[in-house]
Every structure is written in C-alpha cells, then in structure tokens.
Amino acid sequence: MDFSSGHFPIDIVILALVAGFLILRLRSVLGNKTEIDKKEHPVPAMVVAKFKPNSDQPTKPVEEVKPKVEINIPSPDTEIGQTLSRISQLDPTFIPQKFVEGAEIVFRKVLTAFANEDLPTLQSMLITEAYRAFEGAIHQRRNMEERQVIEIKSIHSITLTKAQVIEDASMNRAVIEVQFISNQINCTFDKHKNPVTGTESVTEFIDFWTFERMLGVNNQGISWRLKSARSG
C-alpha cells in the first residue's frame, strides 16, 4: 500500500477493530466456561433420594408372642401314669397330650360362657349335675342384677393331678382331675357397677377341674365333659 500520499488506511483500522472485538468475545466465552467447570456440580435429586433413608416406609407391627403353657403329664411309671395307660387300653383314641389340649379349650370356653350367661354352651360341655350348679349360679346373679367379668390373660400350667378308671359290668368310666394355674381378671359387679366380689386387677388363680368320659360308647362327638370345678 502507498502511504506517501498522507492518507491513513481506514480499511486496516476497521479490520483491527473487528479482530480485537472477536478476541475479546472469545476470551469472554472461554473464561465463563472455565468458571463453570470449576464450580461443583450438584448431585441430581434422584441420586440423593437413592441414598436417603426411606423413613416413609411403614414398619411392620410387632406380633405379640403368646406365652407357652407348661404341660405336666405324669410319666408311665407313676400311679397316675399307669391309670392313663389303662384308659388308653379301654379307649385307643385317648392320648394324654390331646386330652390336655382339649381340657384347655373347655376351660376357656366354660369360663367365657359362664360370664356371658351362655347356658347352651355350658350344657354341651358339662355333665347334668355340674350344669345345674352353673345354671343356679347364673340365675342367682340375674336375680341380684349382678354382672360377672372373666378374662383369662394367660395360662401358666396345666397338670394332670389325678386319674381314675371306674370299671363296671355295664359301663366303664374314666375320671381325670386337671390343675389350671392362670392369670385372670375375675370380678362381679352389682347393678351400680360397683365390685362385689373378686378384683379388677389381674390375679393368679389355681383351679382343679374334674373331667369324666364314658368309655366304649358313642358320645356324639363329645369326648370329655366337666364333672366338677373347685378352687385350689
């Protein structure tokens, strides 16, 4: 280019200004990118949730453990054990362990039926004399406008304490006494809902129940019936 004429080349100035502008813009862009790269990248929300304890998940309810009942069946070398063996000879369906399980069911059902004045249930599980005694107690309670509450909280032990075989020419009978040790709420209230007998607190009871069965006959599905009951 010829600068001898004294004219400054305007086109060069324009190109220089454009080049400078482009350099500044490029530096600005590169500088911002570097600053972004230096910043700590946030952890995605879904990743955080993956490691967060799941406190919203419902916990399973703890199941109440039913206390184990202590079962005491005399050994075959004892007097009671020999009588139990004799009952098995006369009635092959008799198994002491099964008898104890059935006695526990009757114990619970009879006490519940007695408190609820359920006479049909009592009649199906008691011999005639025992049923009349329970029925009389219920009628007396009704006449006095009393109400009895019986709630079995737990049964600690069931023990076979006596056994007898009554052999007769016409009919053989087996009689077994069972001891129940249990925790109960057993209380009678008057018509004003005041306690008359017993207590509203959980109390230990020792009961002796005697069961009877006719051997060698069809009892229409009823194996053993309650003959009598007394407190220890």
Image (spheres, rainbow, N blue to C red):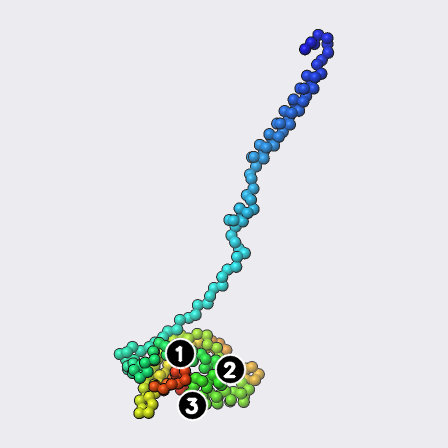
Is 67 in front, or is 187?
Answer: 67
Q: Where residue 216 sits: x, y (%)? A: 34, 86
Give the residue displayed 40% in from the left and 78% down from the top.
102
Q: Earlier in the sequence, mark 1 or mark 3?
A: 1
Q: Secondary structure at mark 2?
A: helix
Can residue 42 be seen at all in this image of the molecule?
Answer: yes
User: On the picture, is 13 further left or further right than 230?
Assistant: right
> Residue 116: which numbered mark, if any?
2
Give the residue displayed 42% in from the left and 75% down from the top.
155
Q: Where residue 27 sits: x, y (%)? A: 61, 27
> Residue 129: which numbered mark, if any?
3
Give the residue displayed 43% in from the left and 84% down from the top.
125
Tell me if residue 26 comes above or below residue 44 in the rendering: above
In what quadrant of the picture does the N terminus appear? top right
Label 1 Cα crowd, 10 Å radius (few <14 / some 14-19 / many 20+):
few
Quadrant position of residue 43? top right
User: Residue type at mark 2?
Assistant: Asn
**Circle 1 is placed at which residue position?**
102
Is 102 in front, or is 42?
Answer: 102
Q: Where residue 140 sits: x, y (%)? A: 51, 89
